[in-house]
């Protein structure tokens, strides 16, 4: 042909303006060939002798670098929030310990699971070891994520909120020990210095029995061990690649570690059944609610029809997520600058709140 028809940009876009959800765009030049100009003589798609600016069409395309801003300072705030609530939990355990009634006067409450399953002493160690393995696996996986700052602030916020709820529930309702095997530390009453030492010991040992740091009673409703076993598995599942051959095996092993750990808590008679059930329910609901709100842009707008905006932490949620305009992709990189490798695989996206 002697002439090439001019490219009609309106025909390409269907008469609609396409803008990315983030509102950030990059510009590119699209060459429109004219008479006497051959596209195969144009290096990199730009003609050397072009003088007529009308022969180029400027198109706006999404800028992916603005779609998922790292904002590590927000992750730092979320970490401080989680750390504060973990410390407050240790303080609250020390306070509640002084209120736990003696097991000789107030025996354990009836529990259907305990009626049918005898206590296995070593089972609680299995639960704590499984929890440590899951925390280790999730930490490694988190370090390999490209958008680890966004995922990290989500983890810290959810974990911090769960332990904030736990501080409230264990304080307002103090349950007697679940079994006569409990050996609670002596009460200190007004000895503030000794209480402070117990708090520091509990924090330094991670609140684990295998480290010898958990010697107090009263932190039953709800189970902190169940929280960690559940939340680590949920994050591992949410931010794992779906198309890898090893994914199903890896996820199955993590699920097994979590499920066995939770069951071992009950077998060891370290928590009432209601403690474990409430912990599982609150953890899964908060995780699913948060990710549903984060993945659906319309749920980030307060309105009368958006009931999610009624939660007390909605403004904090907006602060953490307002610059994240879509679902975070499962993109993996080395945590150091060399050698860079990337694996882009889709994550599970929640379109609605899941039900138990």
Image (spheres, rainbow, N blue to C red):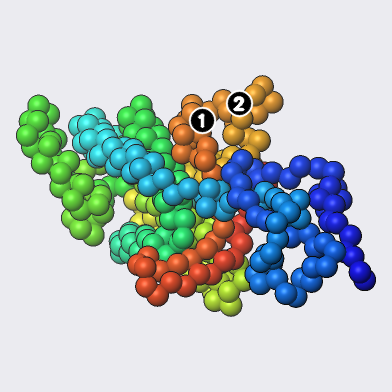
| Residue 302, disc | 2
Name the residue at the bottom extreme: 245
**Label 1 crowd bin: few (<14), some (14–19), many (20+), radius 10 Å:** some
User: Closest to the observer: 238 or 32?
Assistant: 32
Q: Where is residue 281 in the image (x, y as percent from the top left)?
A: 52, 43
> In the image, is residue 311 above or below residue 185?
above
Is label 2 in a helix, a strand or a loop? loop
Q: Where is residue 244 in the image (x, y as percent from the top left)?
A: 58, 74
Q: Position of residue 4 (x, y in %)?
A: 88, 64
Residues under labels 2 and 1: Cα distance? 9 Å
> In the image, is residue 326 above or below residue 117?
above
For the question of whether residue 300 can be seen, the reply is yes
Disc 2 to disc 1: CB gap under 8 Å: yes
For the question of whether residue 237 can be seen, the reply is no
User: Closest to the observer: 267 or 40?
Assistant: 40
Residue at 70%, 60% in the rendered image: 50
| Horizontal arrangement in the rendering, residue 245 relative to residue 80 (left or right) | right
Q: Position of residue 155 (x, y in %)?
A: 43, 48
| Number of marks drawn | 2
Residue at 40%, 69% in the rendered image: 334
| Horizontal arrangement in the rendering, residue 148 relative to residue 246 (left or right) | left
Quadrant of residue 107 in the image? top left
Residue identified by numbered label 1 = 314
> Looking at the figure, which quarter contains the N terminus?
bottom right
Residue at 52%, 59% in the rendered image: 239
Residue at 23%, 59% in the rendered image: 210
Is label 1 in a helix, a strand or a loop? helix
């Amino acid at each position: 042909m002697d002439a090439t028809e001019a490219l009609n940009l309106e025909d390409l876009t269907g008469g609609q303006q396409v803008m990315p959800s983030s509102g950030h765009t990059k510009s590119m030049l699209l060459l429109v060939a004219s008479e006497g100009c051959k596209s195969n003589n144009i290096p990199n798609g730009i003609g050397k002798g072009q003088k007529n600016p009308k022969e180029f069409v400027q198109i706006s395309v999404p800028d992916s670098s603005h779609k998922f801003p790292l904002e590590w300072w927000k992750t730092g705030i979320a970490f401080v929030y989680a750390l504060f609530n973990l410390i407050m939990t240790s303080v609250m355990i020390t306070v509640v310990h002084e209120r736990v009634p003696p097991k000789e006067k107030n025996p354990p409450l009836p529990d259907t699971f305990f009626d049918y399953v005898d206590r296995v002493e070593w089972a609680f160690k299995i639960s704590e070891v499984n929890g440590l393995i899951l925390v280790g696996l999730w930490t490694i996986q988190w370090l390999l994520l490209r958008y680890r700052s966004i995922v990290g602030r989500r983890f810290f916020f959810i974990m911090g909120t769960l332990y904030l709820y736990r501080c409230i529930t264990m304080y307002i309702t103090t349950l007697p020990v679940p079994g006569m095997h409990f050996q609670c530390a002596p009460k200190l009453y007004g000895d503030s210095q000794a209480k402070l030492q117990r708090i520091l010991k509990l924090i330094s040992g991670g609140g684990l029995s295998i480290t010898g740091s958990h010697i107090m009673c009263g932190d039953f409703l709800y189970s902190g061990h169940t929280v960690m076993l559940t939340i680590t598995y949920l994050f591992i599942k949410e931010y794992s690649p779906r198309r890898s051959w090893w994914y199903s095996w890896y996820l199955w092993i993590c699920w097994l570690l979590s499920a066995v750990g939770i069951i071992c808590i009950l077998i060891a008679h370290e928590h009432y059944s209601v403690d474990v059930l409430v912990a599982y329910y609150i953890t899964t609901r908060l995780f699913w609610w948060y990710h549903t709100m984060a993945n659906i842009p319309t749920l980030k707008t307060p309105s009368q029809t958006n009931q999610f905006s009624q939660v007390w932490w909605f403004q904090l949620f907006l602060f953490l997520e307002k610059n994240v305009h879509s679902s975070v992709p499962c993109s993996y990189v080395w945590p150091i600058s060399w050698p860079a490798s990337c694996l882009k695989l889709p994550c599970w996206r929640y379109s609605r709140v899941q039900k138990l």
